[in-house]
Every structure is written in C-alpha cells, then in structure tokens.
Amino acid sequence: MDSTVYNDKYNKQREELLKKKDIVKEGDKYILKVNLEFKSPSGASIFVFGGSINGWLDWKNDKGVTIDKLYRKKSK
C-alpha cells in the first residue's frame, strides 16, 4: 500500500494480505477482500491510513454519522 504504517505488525499484515490478493489495487484505491477484526476503531484506522488517527471520529456510516455518535454518544 502507499503509506507505511508506524506499527510493524500492521505493515507485515498488509504485505501478507497483498501477496495473498486479499487486498487488491483497483485504480487508485485498495480494496480489502476479507473481513478483519481490530481491537478498536482506531486500530482499524491505523491499519488503513498508516498513522495515528481517531477511528471513533473517522469511521462514518453512509449518512456521515461517526461511530462515536452511533455507539458512544447515543443520539436522542
């Protein structure tokens, strides 16, 4: 993938998934073809984006609502 993750574990995981074609490049995007589980939303963001990111605020549903609002700060 284009950005190196500061976490070696995630770099190795990305490399393995690319070799197995579980991640494929389509145009200028990478597509993950398998389900992965992470301990936190931020861990998933770090895997995808390559840096320290707040996954609770970065991951959004199709309506643009963050998972923070959906799961931690239930809307009234």
Image: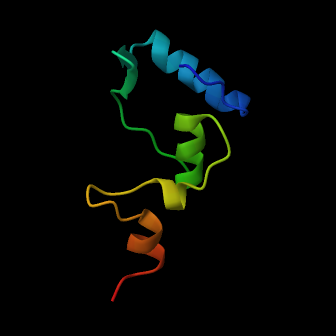
Looking at the image, which residue is at 39% across and 19% down? Answer: 28
Location of residue 66 with respect to 39 vertically, above or below: below
> Where the C terminus falls, by quadrant?
bottom left
Q: Position of residue 56 (x, y in %)?
A: 52, 61
Q: Residue furthest bottom?
A: 76
- Please indicate whether residue 8 sits to the left or right of residue 31 in the image: right
In the picture, measured across the screen, residue 6 lies left or right of residue 62, that is: right
| Residue 9 in the image, given as x and y percentages of width and height | 68, 30
Residue 2 vs residue 40, the one in the foreground:
2
Image position of 47 (left or right of 62): right
Residue 25 location (% of width, % of height): 38, 16
Against 6, is 56 above or below?
Answer: below
Which residue is located at x 26 percent, y 55 percent? 62
Colour convention of the picture: rainbow
Number of numbered tags placed on the structure image:
0
Q: Residue at x 53, y 17 (%)?
A: 16
Is 5 on the left-hand or right-hand side of 35?
Answer: right
Is residue 71 in sight in this rendering? yes
Task: Specify the quadrant of the image occupied by residue 11.
Answer: top right
